[in-house]
Image (cartoon, helix red, strand yellow):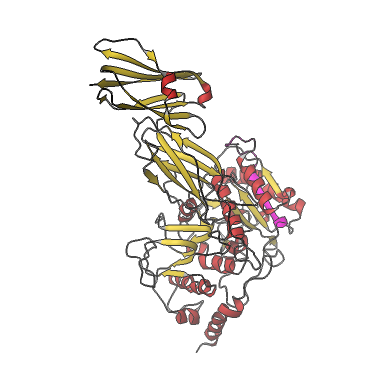
Amino acid sequence: MNPAKSLLSVLALLSLSSSFLPAQTTTPSDPKRLLVVYNDSWPDRNGNGVGDSKELALYYAKARQVPSANLLGLKIPGTSRSIGGSGTKAWGALHDLIVTPLKARLKKLGTTKIDGILLCYGVPYRINSLSAAKSLRAIDHLIQVPDGLGTKTSWGFNGWWTTNPYFESSPGVGTDKGRFQHSLYQYRYQDYYLVTRLDGFDLEASLDLIDGALYAEKYGSKGQGTMDGNAYVDTRFGKKTDSWLKSNYPNYPGYRTYGLWDMRMAYAKLWTEAKKIPTLWEPSGKEIGETGAKFTNNKPALLAPDALLYFGWYNYNQYHDVWTWLTGSVACDLNSNSIAGFDSRTATRKGFLTKAMERGLVAGAGVIAEPYLSGHERPEILLYYLLKGYTFAESSALGDPTLWWRGVRMGDPLYAPYRTGLKRIKDTNKPVARWTRVTARTGISATLDLALVRSVTSPELGRATVAYGTTPAMSQKLDPKKGHHARQLVPIGKLDPKAAGYYTQVTWTDPAGNATTLPPFAMTPRAFTKIDVHLSGPASIQQNSLLPIRFSLASMPNLWNLKTFAIEIRQTLPKQGPWIDITGLALGIASEVAFGPEAESLLFQMKVPFPLKGSFEFRIRASNALGSDSQVLPLVAK
């Protein structure tokens, strides 16, 4: 037997005991050793007086107790997520806007007194660099070694990527790389930094990544004080026995390149099993959620409930919406655009991680464009170090083979769900609503914009479900199944534009099962920028029978802006009469009254015996400072 291979086999076997267990006992990186970078020119889109990028940085600094001196505001004009242009124009702008002020702050703080750099929502993440080939780069990757970026007109390196000095190629074999230290991990005597990002479609999506990490560390993945849930591994080159995976790790005979990486991912299932995490493995080449996919326990791999950890491949340009991500979940899917489009709600080619974070994933490492196999984050290595108690910043850096390429590591850099000594408690708090709004009305659809109160000391996330209908019974139910967030956008379709309005009620449920049901509110389905009035009822009734009419009134920005409002009736046959104001009567006997969530609308019913006979018209009309609207409802009483 080959002595070298024999030695590796022994080391592989030992990796599940002495090398892997027990978990890392040292503490995670000190928040004083983290530099938080934001765009001080980014707009204040929520109107609270603070730019959204800065607001994210301040929230994170408060949550993790990062010193104020460790916050760096960059002056980057515009709202593009790219450094504009190409060639020397873009490269010069990168230096002027990011690299130069970054290096100045690092020098002021002490270049080796900072281990990590966190980029916040609003800081650009991509650039077309000086390279003629494969010029698209992730800014996150470039600034890992700020002193290696040359000048405003020239590269500081060869134009392609190079090896990350902190990359661990075969964890568990020999001596693993330890906690990050500048003295041990440099690139050509230049300081290397752990670069991560908190980002998303908007500020609220970015904040959810922080709150998800805080919640998992304080309460656990289901709010019960423990990290419960499943680990999923998805490989492509077939099933092997545990003994074969152990005895041949890390150099599997007969496997090269893709197959070798595949077997190493398969081997990593032994690490989750050693931590007693229920592990499900799909090895066939089908993706989890794809027809024909099957776990090694012979059960169909069509659903992925209670997903806590995921490592595998190859979901290029696809996301099978079968995953239920637990709070605190971490994932890495190796494919050619694994985190593409994370900054856009409407991107047509969203990466797997982008969609997963929309569904509640808290952290993941991927790429924004084709990395080639050797340039992508290694899922099993990120997993290995996370399970050993390392921070997400360390774990994702250890699993990233490259410098100056296309990688983005998305999540709280200090998140360490498996660190030794972490004490959790059970979540007993009910979610508290921050706002409930109705947006994007089209008549046949509307979107609910829902948010919970955020707190860095008592983090809270929830899943919103909605009951709605044209009567207070609200017989229609909607569960968007978007995971747990502190803010959710819930689209509601197939609405009736002729309905006066909809009664609507929202229930928030947090990961622990604590639920808060909000009072019912009125929802006007029709789009309006000034004022909207509507009434609905039967076209005909029998004389002396009950007449039910529903009235809706909506005013921008709210009902306090009304100037006039009237409900009127007139007879049209056998003879047309004058309009008679019945506003007082209608409001006096109004039932099933509901107001819009921000007092922008009113919905109620008038139900009264109608003693008259003939043809009639009911009219509702209103005006505010912006305009006026009216509607007439004909009625025949037989």
Query: Going by the image, does 323 lie left or right of 609?
Result: right
Name the residue rendered at 49%, 80% in the picture. Answer: 246
- Residue 156: give x, y in percent of width and height: 64, 55
Query: Going by the image, does 301 lie left or right of 96?
Result: left
Task: Depth check: give the residue in front, 613 or 6.
Answer: 613
Query: Going by the image, does 118 lie left or right of 323?
Result: right
Tell me how many marks there are: 0
Visible residue check, residue 469: yes
- Residue 524: give x, y in percent of width and height: 42, 32
- Residue 154: give x, y in percent of width and height: 62, 50
| Residue 7 falls in image quadrant | bottom right
Visible residue check, residue 151: no
Query: Going by the image, does 549 lie left or right of 521?
Result: left
Task: Depth check: give the residue in front, 438 or 237.
Answer: 438
Query: Magenta segment range?
Result: 31-49
262 up-or-down from 132: above or below: below
Name the residue rendered at 58%, 77% in the picture. Answer: 173
Question: Does the segment drawn in magenta span residue 392?
Answer: no
Residue, far bottom: 1
